[in-house]
Image (spheres, coloured by chain):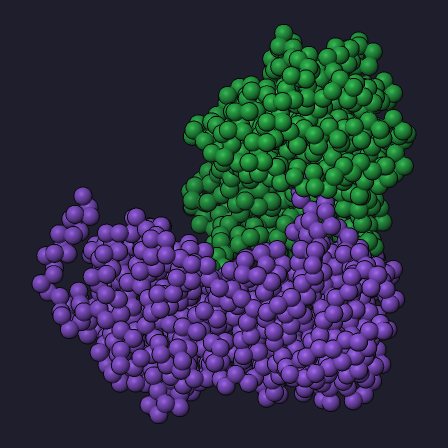
Chain colours: A green, B purple
C-alpha cells in the first residue's frame, strides 16, 4: 500500500525530470529489472534486504552531516562513511525499488553536504598523510566522492534544477577541484590514492557532463598524460596484473580502477578501456583472485591478514569483470563471496550464478612478474592443486612496493590444509580501532612489522634489508631467475643483490611431491655470498604449537632474554636455544590437527626459538613463535631447510596418524657446480635434489652423487632412489 | 558384479548358520533395511561410505594383531584401536550390505586375538593407571570389549561351532573375566572406567548367552549390588543427570551407559532400564547436550577443549536416546552432528531427520545439581537465549569430581557470539600425541591446569583450594544458594567453605539484560570472609587481544618476572601491573571482531596482567592472558567485577561500531544487609543491583540507595533509573 503511494508520487513527479541529467553510470532500466527479480536471486536477495535495512535505518536516523573532527574509526569519520554509503545505496535503491524516499534521503544528505563542504578547511585530525576535508586523509575523501557520485548519478534527474545546481557546484565540483587542482601533487602521483582521486574526479566528470574533469582524471592535472588514470594503468600494474604494493593493496587499489574503467566503458566506448594495455584492468582482477588462499589475500607488506575476497572491492571487481568478459570462473568466485553488487553488472552475475553457469576458478601455480615492465622481480606462487585445501607456497621475490612495502626480499609463506603455516605478520595495525593509535599504523609497524627479522628471510648482522630505508629499497629489485609451476618438482629461484652492501643471496624454494606422502615436501636452499664474515639469521615464523625438537634445548624458563636492541630484534623474546648436529635439526609443531616438521641441514647453525611481544608496553603485537637459524662468522653459507606437513589429529575420534615425520634425515653437499640436497625417508627411499649455480633453463649439468652419475638440464635436477639402492 | 558374487556366497553359506547364535544387540532385519535406504539418507550415506572405506582398507592391510608394546598414541595402541573398530564395523557392515567379506575380516581378526590374548600379561607400558593387557590402561581394554562384542554379535551365527567356541572362550570370556574377576577392585569402583568394564562384560554376557556375566555387570563382581552398573547409575549421575567429573567426561562416560542400557532394554525389557531412577540414562544424554556451547563441551576439569558433540559417544547417545524417546529435539542435535550411527537406532534417526521431524533443541538456563542426591553443589548455566551465538555464563559450583577434578570452586566461564571469552584451560594434555608425554596428562596438568590460579576464582595466599589435595577436596562441596534462570536478571549464588581453613567465600554471578544493549552485562560479586589478613588473588583468564586499559600500566617490556614459585604461579609471566582508582579499573580486549570490557570495582586492588608459559621448558602450555585482581592484607573483602560485550569490527567492510564501552562506571557500597552495585551507563542511566546477605528466595529486603528507598524480595534486587533520576 505504502509502496503504491510512493510509486504514485513518483509518477506525478516524473514530468519535472530533466532528461539531460539522466543516469550515466548504471542503466536505470536494468536496475528496475533487478527490483523485480532480486527476490529470486540468492546472490542479490540478502544484499538488497541488507541495503534496504541500512537505508531505512539511515532515514530513521535523519540527516547527520557532522563537522569533521575525528581520525579513522572516530565518530565523525564513521558518520561520513555511513553517509556516502547512504547516498550510494539510496540512489541505487531508488532505481531498484522505485521508492522515492530513497532518492529523497540521498538528496537531503547531499544538500547538507552542499552547506557544510564550502566551509571546510584542512581536517583537524590530519597527521602525516595528505589531509582531506571530510576525513583525516584525502584518500577517504576520494572514496567518498567515488561512491557519492554514483548515488548522485542515480537521482540527479529527479532534482529541481536549483538543487542540482547547488549540489553540482558545492559538493561535486568543489570536491573534484580539491582532489585534483588544489592537491595536484598527490593527484599526479603514481599511487593508489591518486587512482581513487582520479576515479572520483572522472566519474564526477561523467555525472556533471564535464569532459574537462574526465580528461584531468585520465591524463593528470595538466592533461599531459604524464599522470592520471591511464598512466597509472601503465605503471601501477605489472604486465601480469600484479600491483606493486602487494595483494592487500591490490584489492584496495582495484576498486577505483574497475569502477572508473566501467564508467569509461559505458560513457566513452571508443576509449576501449578494457582492452588498454592488453586488458590490464581485467588481468588485475584475476591476478588479485589468484593471490589468495581459501579466499584470504596473501598478507605480504602492510596487510591486514583478515582480508578476504568478501569485500566490497572484490564484489565490484567480480561483477564488472564478469560483465566485461562473461568468464564463468568469476561466477565461481561470486558464489564463494555469497553476494554481488546492486548494479546492472551485479544483476548479470546473480542471474548467471542462479542459472548454474559457474565454472571452477582455475587456481594454479603461476609467476606474477613485478614492475611496469615485468623486470622488477616477481611473486612466485606454487600450488599443489586448485583446491582450497591444497598446499600453496608463495615466494616473495617482488620489488619494494612503495611505502607499504616491507624489507623482506626473498621472503616466503606456506599454506596447508586451509591454514597459514609459514606466516607473514602483515601490518601492525588495528584498522579503524580508535583505542589503538586511532586505527592507524602502530609504532610497531615501523619497529617490528616492516623489519626483515619479522619475516622468513635472511638478516645480515642484525640489521634489515636496505637498513630499512625506503629510497635505497626502491632502487633495486630481486631477480626471478627461474620458475617452474608444473610436474612433481615445482620451484622458484630468486636472487637479491644490494639489500646489504657486498652481499648477494639466492633462494631456491621447491615443492617436491614424493610418492606415498600426502603433501609435497618444501625444500628451501638459501645461498649467501658475502664480502666479510658476518652474523646470518634466517627466521621462520610459524603458526602452531611446538610439539618437540630433535635436538636438546636450553630453555629460558624464568627469564627470557630479549633478542636484540633494534631493527625488530627488540620485540623478540628468546624462549630457548639449541645446537643441532648433522642429523637432528628438527622442530615439529602442530597446527589445526596437523603436524609440521621443519628440518635444518645448515652446518654450524645455532637455533633460537623466539616469540614476538617484547618491548611492547601497549600490547600492540600479536605473540607469535619463530625459529631462527643463526650462523656466526661465515662469509659464504648455504642454508638448507625442509618443511614437511604430516599426519592428523582428529579431536572427534581422538585418533592420531602420522605424528612422526616421514623424513629420516636431510643433508647438503657440493657436487660439480651444484648444491645437492639428499632427503632420506624413514622407509629408506631417497630423494636427491640438485640446485645448479647456473640458473638458465637449458643448462646441462652432471655430478656424481653417492657413487652414481646424475645428469640434469636446467637449474634443478631430481633423482629418486628406492630403499637400499 | 563383485557384490553379486558376494551375495551368492552369502546365500550358499546360509544353511550353516546357527540359530542360537543370532544377533541380540542389533536387529539384522533393520540393518538390512539400512543397506537398502542409506544412499538416500544424508546422515547415513557418508558414514556408511566412510566405514566401508575404512573396512576395505583394513581388509587390504590384512590381519595385524601386534603384541602390545606402546602407550597411548603409539603404534600398537593405535592398531588395537583400529582393530576393534574393524571388528565392530565389519560385523555391522556385513549385516547392512550382506557382503561376506566383512564378516570374514572380523572373524579373522577375532581368531588372531584368540591366539594372542591368552599369552598376554600386564601391558609393558603400564604406568600409574590400572594396566590392561591389550592397552596400557585397562580402560582401553574395556572399550575394546564393548565394541568388539557388538561386532562379534553381528557375525557370531555365521561362524563354525569350533570358531565360535574358540572366540567365545579365548577372547570374550577371558577378557570379561580379566576385566571383572581378575581386576575386581577396579571393576567394583564407582567410576566411569568401571562402567566401561561393566558394559563390556554385560554385553559379552548377552552375546555369549551367559546370564552370570550380565548379573556381574549389573550388580558388581560379587553380585551384591553394592557395585556394578545399577549402582553406578545411582551414584555417578546427579538427579539432574550431571556426571561428577564434568561435561568432558560425561560425554565419555555416557557411551557405556547408553550402549549397555540399550542392550539391556533389548534383551531384558522387564528391567525397564530406561525408566530406572526417573529415566536417569536419558536425562544424562540431554544434560550432556545442555552442557555445550556451539556444540563444544564446557571444558571444566580435565577436559580437552576441542571436544564437541561430533563424537562417537554422542552419535550413539543421540541415536539410542531417540530410539527410546522419539524426542524430536534429539534429531536437531543429529542434524548438527551431520551423521548418525550404523545401527538399527541410527536408521530411525536418519529416516526421521530426512522426513523433517527435527525440532530445535531447547537450550535453556538451567541448574544442574551435583552429587548422587543433588546436594553437592551444582553447575549453573545461564543462557541469554537458545541460539548458538547467545551469551552463556557457566558457574562452576560443583563438587570436586574425583581425580579429574580441578581445584577451582566457584570458577566461572563465559561464551559470547560463538567464542569462548572467559576461559578454562582444561587439561594440560595433547591427547594421543606420543611426543607429548606419550599422549597422557602432562606434568603441567599437575603443576598448572589443576591449580586454582589457572582458573577464574579466588586464591588465598598463593595456594590452591584444599592445597590441591584430592581427599580433602572430595570431602566438602560448595552450596548452591540461589539460582534464577528467567527474566532480565538471571543469577547464580554459590558459597564455599573449607577450601581454605577459616575462609568462606560466596559468589554471585548475574547476567543483567539492559535495554538498548545488544548483550547482557555480567556482574560478579565475590565476597570473602577470612580469619586473618591474607593475600587474595582473583584471576580472569580470557581469550582475546588486549586493546587498552583505563588505568596506567607499568609494563615489563624487557624482563618479565615470573609471578611465583609454586601452585601454578610459577607458570605465569607478569606482563604489566597497575593500580586503578575508583573509576578507571577497566581492561578492554578484542575477540573475533567483538570488544569485551572488564571492569573492576574492588577498592585497593592491584591489577596484574599475566600470561601462562613460564617454567615450561618443553613448550607444553598454551600461552594465554589473564587479568589478576590482587588485594593484600584484607580479612574480609568484596570483589566486584563487570564484564560487558560490546561493538563489532567487521574485517570485510572495515567498519567498527561500539568500540567504546556503554558503561561509564561501576561502584560498590553496603546498604542495609546488602551489597549494592551501581552501574552507570554512558547515557546517564543507572542499573542498581542489590545482593542481600540472606540468600533465601522469600527474604524481604530494603535499603536506601542514592536517597531512595529500594525494596526487594529474594537475594537479588534490581532498580533501573533513567538518566538524571
Q: Position of residue B442 (x, y in %)?
A: 59, 69
| Residue located farthest toward the top when viewing the structure as drawn | A270
Residue depicted at 76% across the width and 28% down the height: A110
Q: Is residue B579 above or below residue A491?
A: below
Instruction: Report the quarter where the N terminus of chain A lies.
Output: top right
Q: Position of residue B143 (x, y in %)?
A: 38, 71
Viewer-side residue, B155 vs A530: B155
Q: Is residue A577 at all visible to an observer of this figure? A: no
Q: Is residue A590 at all visible to an observer of this figure? A: yes
Instruction: Report the quarter where the C terminus of chain A lies.
Output: top left
Q: Quadrant of residue A143?
A: top right
Residue depicted at 35% across the width and 76% down the height: B274
Q: Position of residue A604 (x, y in %)?
A: 69, 48
Q: Quadrant of residue B259?
A: bottom left
Viewer-side residue, B590 vs B333: B333
Left or right? Give the position of B514 relative to A448: left
Left or right? Give the position of B620 relative to A200: left
Left or right? Give the position of B440 relative to B423: left
Viewer-side residue, B452 vs B12: B452
Q: Is residue B90 above or below residue A498?
A: below
Residue depicted at 49% across the width and 29% down the height: A37
Q: Is residue B287 above or below residue A205?
A: below
Residue depicted at 30% across the width and 76% down the height: B264
Q: Position of residue B52 (x, y in %)?
A: 31, 52
Amino acid at each position: 500500500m505504502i509502496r503504491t503511494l510512493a510509486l504514485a508520487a513518483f509518477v506525478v513527479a516524473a514530468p519535472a525530470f530533466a532528461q539531460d541529467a539522466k543516469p550515466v553510470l548504471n542503466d536505470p532500466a536494468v536496475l528496475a529489472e533487478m527490483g523485480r527479480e532480486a527476490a529470486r536471486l540468492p546472490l542479490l536477495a540478502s544484499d538488497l534486504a541488507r541495503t534496504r535495512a541500512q537505508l531505512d535505518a539511515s532515514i530513521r536516523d535523519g540527516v547527520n552531516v557532522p563537522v569533521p573532527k575525528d581520525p579513522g574509526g572516530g565518530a565523525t569519520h564513521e558518520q561520513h562513511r555511513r553517509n556516502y554509503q547512504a547516498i550510494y545505496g539510496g540512489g541505487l535503491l531508488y532505481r531498484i525499488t522505485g521508492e522515492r524516499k530513497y532518492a529523497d534521503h540521498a538528496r537531503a544528505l547531499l544538500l547538507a553536504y552542499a552547506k557544510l563542504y564550502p566551509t571546510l578547511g584542512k581536517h583537524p585530525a590530519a597527521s602525516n598523510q595528505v589531509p582531506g576535508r571530510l576525513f583525516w586523509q584525502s584518500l577517504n575523501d576520494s572514496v567518498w566522492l567515488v561512491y557519492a557520485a554514483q548515488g548522485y548519478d542515480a537521482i540527479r534527474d529527479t532534482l529541481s534544477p536549483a538543487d542540482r545546481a547547488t549540489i553540482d557546484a558545492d559538493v561535486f565540483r568543489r570536491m573534484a577541484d580539491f582532489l585534483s587542482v588544489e592537491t595536484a601533487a598527490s593527484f599526479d602521483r603514481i599511487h593508489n590514492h591518486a587512482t581513487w582521486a582520479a576515479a572520483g574526479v572522472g566519474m564526477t566528470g561523467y555525472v556533471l557532463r564535464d569532459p574537462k574533469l574526465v580528461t584531468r582524471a585520465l591524463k593528470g592535472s595538466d592533461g599531459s598524460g604524464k599522470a592520471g588514470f591511464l598512466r597509472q594503468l601503465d605503471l601501477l600494474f605489472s604486465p601480469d596484473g600484479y600491483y606493486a604494493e602487494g595483494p592487500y593493496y591490490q584489492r584496495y587499489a582495484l576498486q577505483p580502477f574497475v569502477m572508473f574503467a566501467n564508467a569509461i566503458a559505458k560513457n566513452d566506448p571508443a576509449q576501449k578501456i578494457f582492452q588498454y594495455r592488453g586488458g590490464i584492468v581485467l588481468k588485475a582482477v584475476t591476478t588479485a583472485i589468484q593471490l589468495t588462499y581459501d579466499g584470504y589475500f596473501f598478507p605480504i607488506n602492510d596487510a591486514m591478514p583478515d582480508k578476504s575476497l568478501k569485500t566490497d572491492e572484490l564484489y565490484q571487481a567480480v561483477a564488472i569483470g564478469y560483465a566485461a568478459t562473461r568468464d564463468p570462473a568469476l561466477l565461481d568466485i561470486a558464489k564463494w563471496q555469497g553476494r554481488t553488487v546492486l548494479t546492472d553488472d551485479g544483476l548479470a552475475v546473480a542471474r548467471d550464478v542462479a542459472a548454474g553457469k559457474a565454472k571452477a576458478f582455475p587456481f594454479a601455480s603461476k609467476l606474477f612478474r613485478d614492475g611496469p615492465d615485468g623486470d622488477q622481480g616477481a611473486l612466485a606462487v606454487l600450488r599443489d592443486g586448485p583446491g582450497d585445501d591444497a598446499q600453496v607456497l608463495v615466494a616473495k621475490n617482488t620489488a619494494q612496493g612503495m611505502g607499504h612495502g616491507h624489507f623482506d626480499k626473498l621472503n616466503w609463506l606456506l599454506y596447508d590444509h586451509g591454514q597459514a603455516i609459514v606466516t607473514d605478520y602483515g601490518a601492525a595495525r588495528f584498522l579503524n580501532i580508535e583505542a589503538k593509535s586511532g586505527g592507524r599504523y602502530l609504532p610497531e609497524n615501523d619497529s617490528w612489522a616492516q623489519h626483515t627479522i619479522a619475516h622468513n628471510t635472511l638478516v645480515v648482522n642484525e640489521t634489515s634489508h636496505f637498513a630499512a630505508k625506503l629510497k635505497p629499497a626502491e632502487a633495486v629489485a630481486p631477480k626471478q631467475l627461474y620458475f617452474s609451476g608444473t610436474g612433481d618438482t615445482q620451484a622458484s629461484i630468486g636472487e637479491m643483490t644490494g639489500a646489504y652492501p657486498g652481499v648477494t643471496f639466492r633462494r631456491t624454494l621447491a615443492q617436491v611431491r614424493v610418492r606415498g606422502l600426502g603433501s609435497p615436501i618444501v625444500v628451501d636452499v638459501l645461498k649467501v655470498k658475502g664480502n666479510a664474515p658476518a652474523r646470518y639469521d634466517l627466521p621462520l615464523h610459524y603458526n602452531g604449537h611446538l610439539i618437540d625438537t630433535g635436538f636438546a634445548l636450553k630453555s629460558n624458563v624464568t627469564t627470557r632474554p630479549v633478542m636484540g636492541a633494534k631493527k625488530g630484534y627488540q620485540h623478540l623474546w628468546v624462549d630457548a636455544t639449541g645446537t643441532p648436529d648433522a642429523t637432528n635439526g628438527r622442530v615439529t609443531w602442530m597446527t589445526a590437527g596437523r603436524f609440521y616438521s621443519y628440518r635444518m641441514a645448515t652446518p654450524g647453525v645455532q637455533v633460537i626459538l623466539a616469540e614476538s611481544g617484547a618491548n611492547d608496553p601497549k600490547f600492540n603485537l600479536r605473540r607469535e613463535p619463530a625459529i631462527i637459524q643463526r650462523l656466526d662468522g661465515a662469509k659464504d653459507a648455504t642454508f638448507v631447510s625442509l618443511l614437511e606437513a604430516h599426519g592428523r589429529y582428529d579431536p572427534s575420534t581422538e585418533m592420531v596418524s602420522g605424528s612422526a615425520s616421514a623424513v629420516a634425515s636431510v643433508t647438503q653437499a657440493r657436487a660439480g657446480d651444484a648444491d645437492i640436497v639428499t632427503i632420506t625417508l624413514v622407509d629408506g627411499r631417497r630423494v636427491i635434489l640438485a640446485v645448479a649455480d647456473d640458473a638458465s633453463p637449458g643448462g646441462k649439468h652432471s655430478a656424481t652423487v653417492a657413487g652414481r652419475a646424475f645428469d640434469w638440464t636446467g637449474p634443478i635436477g631430481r633423482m629418486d632412489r628406492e630403499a637400499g639402492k
